[in-house]
């Protein structure tokens, strides 16, 4: 069987399981709990069919590093604990009628997101082609940039973790309400920027393999970019409703791409 066919069946099974668990438990973050696990597994699966190709070995290593970091960050925030549901799903349930949210859970939360996780690993499938070009300078550049972005996201998440803990300890009524220092001085969401950019960098490996500047693996990063655009807009709407001064931060600080603050 073509490794993509087997991965597609696994994706379908995971999506069905997430949908069933959401419907049964009324908790809808099951895909979030698989988010850091499935892409490295898919990449490793494709790499296993490449007969030890150096490019696929590096891609698997990078995907695993990404997955380990994200799993750790998700776990320490209670994402795997009972009740560790994304607060945005809670808000959407409040806004949507039960039938509409049920459809949203089926189509978007369970199936779309699981398909996206497989698509993010698609560059490994493309790069595993027997006709792939040997390791080149673009592969080296992609590896370096991926690691830099991984470090940037790690720093941003750590800064956010420290801030949230300090905010909890001092009480909601005291001190700043949201983080505006460190990397967050130059971007309102530096971790989001690094996350999206990492998967565009991962896509570069498919280009380096000789598949062309635009190939089928581009679908994953494109959809991820659109997903983060919509998700960030919704997240900021909720934050601005809770903290009106967030509008000032929006006016002074770049949304995603790090840049110097505006006066």
Image (tube, rainbow, N blue to C red):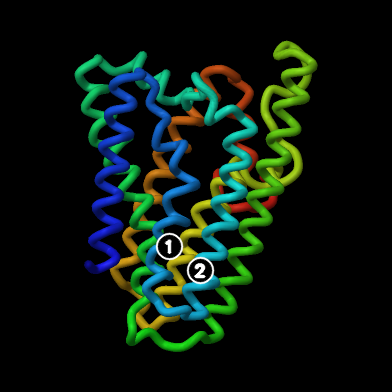
Q: Is residue 120 visible?
A: yes
Quarter location, residue 26:
top left
- Image point (26%, 59%), residue name: 6
Circle 2 crowding by C-alpha within 10 Å: few under 14, some 14–19, many from 20: many
Q: Which residue is mark 1?
A: 43
In the rendered view, would you say 59 is above or below 14? below
Quarter location, residue 119:
bottom left
In the rendered view, would you say 250 is above or below 239? below
- Image point (61%, 40%), residue name: 188
Q: Earlier in the sequence, mark 2 or mark 1?
A: 1
In the rendered view, would you say 196 is above or below 148? above
C-beta proximity under 8 Å, tags 2 and 1: yes
- Residue 148 picture location, percent across and down: 66, 62
- Residue 110 picture location, percent across and down: 30, 36
- Image point (27%, 43%), residue name: 13
Left or right position of 145 against 172: left
- Which residue is more in the foreground, 68 or 86? 68
Q: Which residue is mark 2?
A: 59
- Which residue is more in the foreground, 78 or 191? 78
Circle 1 crowding by C-alpha within 10 Å: few under 14, some 14–19, many from 20: many
Left or right position of 237 against 227: right
């Amino acid at each position: 069987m073509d490794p993509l066919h087997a991965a597609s069946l696994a994706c379908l099974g995971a999506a069905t399981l997430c949908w069933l668990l959401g419907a049964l438990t009324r908790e809808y973050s099951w895909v979030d709990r698989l988010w850091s696990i499935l892409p490295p597994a898919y990449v490793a699966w494709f790499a296993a069919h490449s007969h030890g190709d150096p490019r696929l070995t590096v891609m698997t290593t990078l995907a695993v590093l990404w997955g380990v970091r994200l799993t750790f960050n998700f776990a320490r925030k209670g994402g795997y604990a009972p009740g560790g549901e994304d607060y945005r799903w809670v808000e959407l349930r409040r806004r949507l009628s039960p039938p509409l949210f049920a459809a949203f859970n089926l189509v978007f939360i369970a199936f779309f997101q699981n398909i996206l996780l497989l698509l993010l690993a698609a560059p490994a499938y493309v790069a595993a082609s027997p006709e792939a070009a040997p390791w080149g300078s673009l592969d080296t550049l992609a590896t370096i940039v991926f690691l830099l972005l991984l470090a940037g996201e790690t720093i941003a998440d750590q800064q956010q973790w420290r801030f949230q803990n300090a905010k909890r300890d001092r009480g909601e009524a005291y001190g700043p309400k949201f983080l505006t220092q460190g990397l967050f001085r130059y971007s309102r969401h530096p971790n989001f920027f690094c996350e999206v950019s990492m998967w565009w960098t991962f896509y570069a490996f498919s280009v380096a393999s000789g598949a062309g500047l635009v190939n089928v693996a581009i679908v994953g990063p494109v959809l991820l970019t659109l997903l983060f655009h919509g998700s960030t807009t919704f997240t900021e709407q909720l934050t601005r409703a809770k903290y009106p001064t967030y509008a000032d931060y929006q006016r002074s600080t770049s949304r995603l791409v790090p840049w110097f603050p505006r006066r």
